[in-house]
């Protein structure tokens, strides 16, 4: 399994590097050897035995709406420094931590206490409903059921795309789904 994970990380992170570099000026590109074999080995170690972890990590790193792939990778690496009860905690912690960040003129900053509480409340309502419902609902239906504005439901998953399948604006009746049962 470790060999397969290494091949996967090599391939996906190489693709992410290439995609990112095509959008950047030469001075801002990731190095050709990014992320380096040492970090790939650490990612493999973190992922064993959950291949889903590797997929979630790569989806997270590829989402540079919040920061570049290097910074995203550093966030993943921070998770390995803390002792968690299970590998499953590691799998989703780096994604969920972004709930409490927002864009400002100075980059990403932590939400204030009021924003944090509102964000966590909406997150609990949304994900709790998705977990408990027998059949997934559309954004419109979830909005009515949970009394959360549609835009808040649609915007929240922008950074949760690695764990939620949120239909585009062209599919208003398509259901919002959790991508993997472990979430």
Image (cartoon, rainbow, N blue to C red):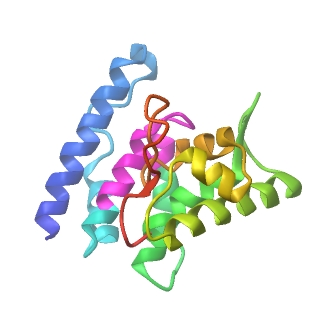
Q: Quadrant of residue 38?
A: bottom left
| Residue 92: image location, x then y, percent | 48, 65
- Residue 66 painted magenta: yes
Q: Main secondary structure of the magenta part?
A: helix
Closest to the observer: 140 or 32? Answer: 140
Name the residue at 45% across, 59% down. 136
Name the residue at 48% across, 35% down. 64
Q: Quadrant of residue 177?
A: bottom left
| Residue 18: image location, x then y, percent | 28, 28
**Which quadrant: the C terminus?**
bottom left
**Please, which residue is most extreme toward the top here?**
25
Seen in the picture, residue 130 relative to 169 is either above or below; the reply is: below
- Residue 112 painted magenta: no
Name the residue at 20% across, 48% down. 10
Seen in the picture, residue 127 relative to 140 is either above or below; the reply is: below
Q: Quadrant of residue 158?
A: top right
Whether residue 81 can be seen here: no
| Residue 175: image location, x then y, percent | 44, 50
- The residues colored magenta run 54-73
Q: Answer left or right for 74 relative to 41.
A: right
Seen in the picture, residue 178 relative to 131 is either above or below; the reply is: above
Closest to the observer: 7 or 137? Answer: 137
């Amino acid at each position: 399994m470790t060999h397969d994970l290494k091949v996967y990380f090599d391939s996906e992170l190489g693709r992410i590097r290439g995609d990112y570099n095509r959008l950047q000026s030469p001075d801002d590109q990731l190095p050709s050897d990014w992320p380096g074999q040492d970090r790939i080995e650490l990612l493999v170690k973190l992922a064993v035995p959950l291949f889903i972890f590797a997929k979630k990590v790569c989806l997270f790193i590829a989402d540079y709406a919040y920061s570049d792939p290097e910074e995203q990778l550093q966030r993943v690496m921070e998770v390995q420094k803390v002792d968690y009860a299970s590998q499953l905690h590691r799998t989703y912690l780096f994604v969920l931590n972004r709930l409490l960040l927002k864009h400002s003129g100075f980059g990403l900053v932590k939400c204030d206490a009021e924003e944090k509480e509102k964000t966590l409340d909406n997150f609990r309502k949304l994900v709790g409903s998705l977990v408990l419902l027998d059949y997934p609902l559309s954004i419109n239906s979830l909005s009515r059921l949970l009394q959360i504005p549609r835009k808040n439901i649609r915007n929240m998953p922008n950074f949760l795309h690695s764990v939620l399948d949120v239909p585009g604006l062209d599919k208003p009746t398509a259901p919002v789904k959790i991508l993997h049962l472990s979430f």
